[in-house]
Amino acid sequence: MPPSPPQTTAPTTNRTFAGLALVAAAGVAGGVLTAYAQGWLPSELGSLANSSGTWMLIAFGLALLARTPALGALSGALALATLLAGYVLGAGLRGDPSSAALMLFWGIAAVVVGPVVGLAAAWVRRGSPARAALGTGAVAGVLVGEGVYGLRYIADTTYPPHWWGSIVAGASTLVVAAIWRRLPARAVALAAAVTGVVAVAFVVVYSADLIAVLP
């Protein structure tokens, strides 16, 4: 019997690079759109273009396309990094250059938070019930935490229904994930607990106004 032809990883590698290229392109486009939307949107919708939850959801959605947890983590980091790059580009074109503090803050977020968001997406899609619960709680917690922060600290200068909407979106994320993945009661309870922890952590970090204290 003749020997089997050697296996090649070229198709898989090509798909991987194509997927990452898609993430990068979508991230840049989303960042540019965010920058311009800050001047286009009415006041009632303006917070959508100033919301970390918006970028988190974009990164999460793009990372859902990844085939493995490692690629999910990489996609999450790449998505946030390119969102930042697109935003800086768009803001510069609008004549509103970004501060070094903003770029440093979101650059750190891309490196630290991006992989977590990407891994959460991979776990929600393909992980065990416990991992799906952790991933769901992480995403829902950011949305709930941002809503609470908005109502507590900036409701007088923004549109409060947006922040209520963020809280509802976080709670809806729990429900949708539980139904989609058919999570058992213990996993749902874990997701709810993680949501609460992440939400509290979000409020603590954001209320510190780290962008203002960065050089």
Image: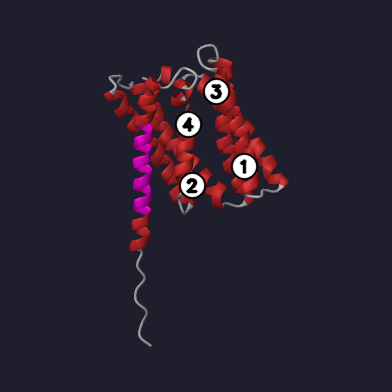
Figure check: 170 above or below 98: below
Q: Judge the density around disc 4: few (<14), some (14-19), many (≥20) Cα neighbours within 10 Å.
A: some
Residue receiving disc 2: 64
Residue receiving disc 1: 176
Magenta span: predominant SS is helix
Q: How far apart are marks 1 and 3 (CA)?
A: 20 Å
Question: Residue 193: percent from the left, percent from the top?
Answer: 66, 36
Q: What type is the residue that disc 1 sits on? A: Val
Residue receiving disc 4: 54
SS at circle 1: helix
Q: Quadrant of residue 110?
A: top left
Question: Residue 43: percent from the left, percent from the top?
Answer: 46, 17
**Contact (CB < 8 A) between labels 1 and 3?**
no
Q: Quadrant of residue 165?
A: top right
For the point 65% across and 40% down, the residue is: 175
Q: Quadrant of the N terminus?
A: bottom left
